[in-house]
Amino acid sequence: MRTALQTLLDSRGKSQSELARLIGKTPSFVNRLVSGKENASKDTIDAVLKALGAKYEEAFPRKKGRAA
């Protein structure tokens, strides 16, 4: 199953290794994030979004049928 983060990386044409370099983390850490084996801190989420030029809503789309 693809994760939202992998979809976002693909849409930006970035690899996991490139993202790792951009946010100052190891490629293995980013791989664990993408695979869902690692939880991200707010600071890490902010760094990922900034590095990819993305908004929170792109990375974490609201599920259909959920109230605001």
Image: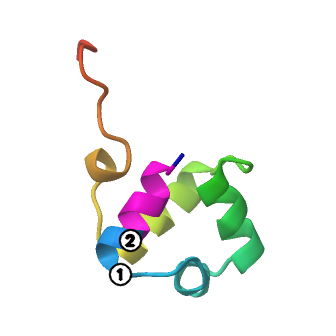
Q: Position of residue 29 (x, y in %)?
A: 73, 67
Q: Amino acid at mark 2?
A: Asp
Q: Is residue 43 magenta?
A: no
| The C terminus: image quadrant | top left
| Pointer 1 local density, CA inside 10 Å: few below 14, some 14–19, many at least 20 | few
Which residue of the protein is positioned furthest toward the front in this rendering?
1
Q: Which label belongs to residue 13?
A: 1
Q: Position of residue 31 (x, y in %)?
A: 68, 66
Looking at the image, residue 44 lies above or below residue 28: above
Nearest the viewer among 25 and 7 is: 7
Q: Are marks 1 and 2 in contact (CB under 8 Å)?
A: yes
Looking at the image, residue 22 lies above or below residue 42: below
Q: Residue at x 54, y 46 (%)?
A: 1
Q: Residue at x 68, y 46 (%)?
A: 39
Residue to which mark 2 is pinned: 10
Q: Secondary structure at mark 1?
A: loop
Decide whether the magenta segment is chiefly helix, strand or loop.
Answer: helix
Which segment is the magenta one? 2-9
Q: Position of residue 17 (x, y in %)?
A: 61, 84
Q: Quadrant of residue 62?
A: top left
Q: Residue at x 27, y 45 (%)?
A: 57
Q: Which label belongs to residue 59?
A: none
